[in-house]
Amino acid sequence: MLIRSRDLSRLHRRQCVACGYAGRFVDRPGQLHCPRCTCDFSERPPKSYAEMEGLEDADLASKRRQRSAYLEPEQRDWRMISRWAVFFCGVAIVAISVVVLGFAAFVVR
């Protein structure tokens, strides 16, 4: 199972349980109230759809956030660059193979 380093899908985005506000201020560590409806987060903490439906534990969600926070942006960028480099090398190998086989098919003696 692939775990995204930064998951922004609606399924995993935390939101206010009272009004549904899912802005960037909901997940702040020191945020005590919802900026839209002033719901108290100590009584009703913000949750994602996956947490509300029981698809994922709150512990797993916090571990995923800790894992993405653990990786520094430079490290994530280098991982992305290395994946793209492997992809382009694979495409180049396939393209060169097609060209060589094409030339071999048209060689007439």
Image (cartoon, rainbow, N blue to C red):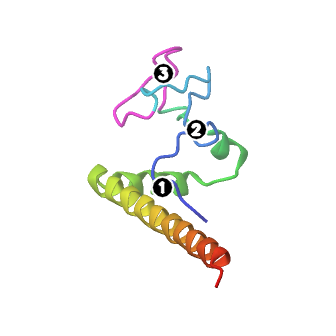
Indicate the quadrant where residue 75 lies.
bottom left
Residue found 52% across the figure and 45% down from its top: 7
Q: Earlier in the sequence, mark 3 or mark 2?
A: 3
Residue 47 numbered tag:
2
Verify whether residue 84 appears in magenta. Answer: no
The CA distance from mark 1 to mark 3 is 23 Å
Q: In which image quadrant can residue 83 be found?
A: bottom left
Which SS class for mark 2? loop
Quadrant into which the N terminus falls: bottom right
Q: Which residue is mark 3?
A: 34
Where does the C terminus fall, quadrant-wise? bottom right
Q: Mark 3 is on which residue type?
A: Cys
Three-letter code for the amino acid on which mark 2 is drawn = Lys
Prevailing secondary structure class for the magenta stretch in the rendered image: loop
Label 3: few (<14), some or many (≥20) within 10 Å? many
Q: Is residue 46 visible from the viewing direction of this image?
A: yes
